[in-house]
Amino acid sequence: MADRTYKILVINPGSISTKLALFSNESTIFTETLHHTDTEMAPFASSPMLAQLEFRLEKILANLRKHEVDMQHVDAVVGRGGLLKPLASGTYFVDDRMLDDLRRAERGEHASNLGAFIAHKLATQAKCPAFIVDPVSVDEWPPVARLSGLAGMDRECLSHALNTKAIAKRFAREHGQEYSNLRLIVAHLGSGISISAHENGKMIDVTNSREEGAFSTERAGTLPVMKLVELCFSGKFTRQEIETQIFCEGGIFSYLGTKDLQEVLRRKQAGDETARLVFTAMIYQISKEIGAMAAALSGMVDAILLTGSMMHAHEVEDALKKRVVWIAPVFSYPGEDEMQAQAEGALRVLRGDEKA
């Protein structure tokens, strides 16, 4: 059915915004980012993520009415995939079992957990299937990547799989090659950082941005473990307060009091030595993680792909290239391809090219 035109509605909830887009096959009809103010989000501050469902759904429906979208003409709705159990890469139907898993939130609360619920609600209205594509829990690791160094405490694969996989496949298409034949390092650099190694079409290792790797604008990354133990048992903080420090108030924010990378670069340019040091340290840590993924690929790397919101700053690209270009050619893909990747994942299923 490759000649048929499909309308696909894509929903991608983030911590303070909800992105939505309508596609006609691979082409975008419109895309919107619905920003949620601090005042709007305040009532949900201490509630499970699912408490935001109706609030976000109402804003989405209002926007769809603005664009005069007839839900009866939508062929599929795709939500962002959340913190599910470990899954293979691919497109998945949203069903009751998936929603039950997300409702329990056993792997944590995250805005992405709302994606399947929103897609299910909208698809029910449209009488069409609801999907997710390459959720953050995509896990293709070999056993050797799981051991952490302490029995019973295995590493967990949680990453920006949707954008990471999309960029790797895009690079392959642009260079006339098959993703499955390439050995790539992909660095997703945003509010969270995922640096991954790809071999034979699989993501064989990746830094879990919730608990390891380079620090970002707001996440702490890998920490000195004994000092972390002391902090946890100091009696000064609750578990939630420590998690907030690590996951939301770490990294650049903990040193400079801002999560705005452009502000950091302005301070650095104005001669702020602390800003210069913190920025340089982040680049240093990202480079170390890229080097580690080169080792995971036995030093045989076809390309290093840099993507995510940080890549809109040429200073990040220039600084990283200086440190890692000796490993392999470096290519930059600013921003992310998540909405397009979600639409294409659904399209492959609708066309019969792939089974959900």
Image (cartoon, helix red, strand yellow):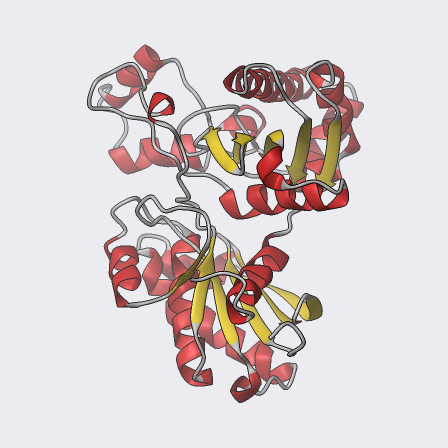
244 or 75: nearer the viewer: 75
> Which residue occupies 45% across, 73% down?
57
Q: Please provide percent x and percent y for residue 180.
A: 58, 38
Judged left or right of residue 96, residue 45 is right
Total marks shown come to 0
| Residue 219 visible in image | no
Judged left or right of residue 201, residue 178 is right
277 or 343: nearer the viewer: 343
Q: Please provide percent x and percent y for residue 295.
A: 54, 15
Q: Quadrant of the C terminus?
A: bottom left
Which corner quadrant of the image does residue 277 belong to?
Answer: top right
> Which residue occupies 37% across, 59% down?
44
Vertical relation: 323 (above or below) 176: above
Which corner quadrant of the image does residue 245 belong to?
Answer: top left
| Residue 339 visible in image | yes
Judged left or right of residue 101, residue 134 is right
166 or 175: nearer the viewer: 175
Vertical relation: 250 (above or below) 115: above
297 or 132: nearer the viewer: 297
Q: Please provide percent x and percent y for residue 14.
A: 50, 54
Q: Please provide percent x and percent y for residue 214.
A: 52, 23
> Which residue occupies 60% across, 75% down?
1
Vertical relation: 75 (above or below) 267: below
